[in-house]
Image: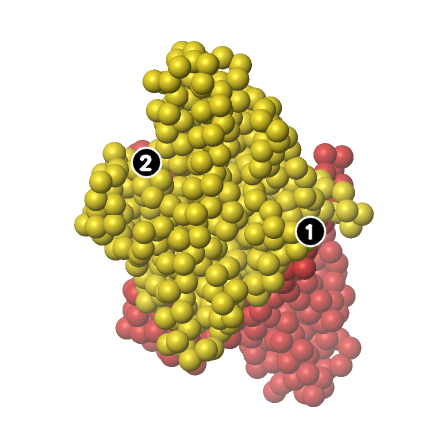
Chain colours: A yellow, B red
Amino acid sequence: MKIGGKHTRSIWTVGEDAFGIFDQTRLPHELVTLTLHSAEDAARVIRSMQTRGAPLIGAVGAYGLALSVREDASDDAINQAVEMLAETRPTAINLKWALWRMRGALLNQPHGKRVALAWAEAQKIADEDVAMNEAIGFNGLKIIETIAEQKSGETVNILTHCNAGWLATVDYGTALAPIYMAHDAGIALHVWVDETRPRNQGAALTAFELGNHGVNHTIIADNAGGHYMQDGQVDMVIVGTDRVTANGDVANKIGTYLKALAAKDNNVPFYVALPSSTIDWTLQSGRDIPIEERSPDEVLKMSGRLQDGSVVTVDIAAPGSRAANPGFDVTPARLVTGLITERGTCAATPEGLRGLFPKD
Amino acid sequence: MKIGGKHTRSIWTVGEDAFGIFDQTRLPHELVTLTLHSAEDAARVIRSMQTRGAPLIGAVGAYGLALSVREDASDDAINQAVEMLAETRPTAINLKWALWRMRGALLNQPHGKRVALAWAEAQKIADEDVAMNEAIGFNGLKIIETIAEQKSGETVNILTHCNAGWLATVDYGTALAPIYMAHDAGIALHVWVDETRPRNQGAALTAFELGNHGVNHTIIADNAGGHYMQDGQVDMVIVGTDRVTANGDVANKIGTYLKALAAKDNNVPFYVALPSSTIDWTLQSGRDIPIEERSPDEVLKMSGRLQDGSVVTVDIAAPGSRAANPGFDVTPARLVTGLITERGTCAATPEGLRGLFPKD
């Protein structure tokens, strides 16, 4: 995607012993890049959410693991690094998928080759993510085209929650890839951007992305989406996901379930866009997905820009009150109209998923 | 209710030509009182939401009108003041109800008596609000007692949205009145407090109230309530309302509808607490309720305390992005378990409402 007219990925290599990312906790106020030199660096930025988005943290984990191999290429060290990195975020499955893939590519190989192999495998994971998101975008575009035709070219209103754009992936995004493709294809679009408390990924990141790409959008409080659906002002919902279980249940950013309920109640199609690495074939239902409990401070405090441009953090709640902060919820498959994957769109059912991915 | 151990109402008279309120935009950071001397003062603080809450702005409107009568007691002046005050908030019906009642009490009376009559009527409206909220609290308490018995004394978890507490009324609150009574009766309680973006009335006001009264509570992002209902951690929802139509549809703070959907999906009882002045018998359905569109700045900015205690407003969204800000949504009667009124609890149906209020 483009920033200031220049094509940019969300993760890039710096020589062969470091890689770079944007510090997403500084967005939308400042565009700051970070250069990471070790697996510990990678773990730290995943934990702090300076990098986030299920597909992107898979790539960050992969590069982090590749850097750990430069320090110690033994089986023990690789297993330890995989474990350390996997624990940084419990809900997203792509991170584990990427780490297990890296481990699989290394453990049976001669120690002397592991540094180069690890770097190459991480690059492959990143490149494949881009190709997958392009395919997701193309498959989602077909759905938007159909709605645009049904509306005879009137503006298509799409609601999204959190950020599943290029900042959440290596490039293009999952939920936003179809939107970018539709915009580039000249379809009249408008995106309702859920603010996505408590971390405001919608207002901070999705709005930043869409604005940079020139896509017409409006930020709304998370509370407002149901009202706009009742009012006929939402034609479809597209969100990303951190994990889809074998039955089609969808774990995604906290609040997704509420929008899925409202979509169902108002006959608004509700789509989830994902690369197949997000599917957890080992879990039969969303009830089994561990839900990350994050810091109460994310609810009790908020960061923003003062008029002089400086960024400060303020306390926003009643002093002395405590907060709870589950990071994700599970949307039952029955509320999902379809899963948009790199291989096409399928029903959120075991049969639907197995139809597209018979061998995974 | 008590602040710092001292019984306090949300509105009080200052001599016979002024009245006082708390500046709710300064809460929870500072407890600042405002003294109002005219109808224009009253209109200004309603518009700015320095005072808010459907029942309380009814009382503020009534006192404001009483002050306008001191300046000009003519029929024309009264009608103009009613109109000016009624336009300050379009969704809440109590404001109009209070103003029409004031007008009705004045127009057929001798001009010389109108100043005293108006002041007395405003006081009566305020006192009646307190009595009504006590009755609502008592009726809601019975429901909480039943749940506490079913749980054999285990903690009852109640979710509430926005602020329908004593800060939204003259005293006690509507949705929070049953909670205060249950707490005072020794029932083990815990309240999930929805933050209630964009104005954070939950985190700022409800948490402030509950904390001052010693009620166990936890602030959560608006996005989180559905997850806790799925997880069996919510035994009931109680909210207030700005207007109930003759069929039982409920207008309340934006986001209420989403919680009602989640409650329905998880068999959690969803109650709405209201004084009968909130019922709009002239509207047959919630579709007819005007929904106030508020300033985008409420979404794009946030106020909070810096570490030095000073209160600042910060920009929180991507620069250049626009926002939309509907203040209310409508929860269809089919999602409402019951309406808790001063006369008892009824079904959210025309028959239910008419059963309790046959002559209104």
Residue furthest to the right: A308
Residue B69 screen position, x and y as percent: 72, 77
Mark 2 secondary-structure assignment: loop
Give the residue type at disc 2.
Ile
Residue A116 to residue A178: above or below: above
Residue B231 screen position, x and y as percent: 32, 40
Label 1 marks a residue whose chain is B
Contact check, label 2 and label 1, Cβ < 8 Å: no
Viewer-proximal residue among A130 and A182: A130
Viewer-proximal residue among B80 and A186: A186
Residue for badge 1: B315
CA gap between label 2 and label 1 equals: 35 Å
Residue for badge 2: A289
Give left or right: position of A203 versus A90: right
Q: Residue at x 42, y 22 (%)?
A: A82
Residue A20 can be seen in this image: yes
Give left or right: position of A106 versus B8: left
Residue B240 screen position, x and y as percent: 46, 58
Residue B187 screen position, x and y as percent: 37, 37
Residue A279, image quadrant: top left
Residue A147, image quadrant: bottom left
Give the residue type at disc 1.
Asp
Viewer-proximal residue among A257 and A360: A360
Q: Nearer the viewer, mark 2 or mark 1?
A: 2
Residue B68, image quadrant: bottom right
Q: Are marks 2 and 1 on the same chain?
A: no
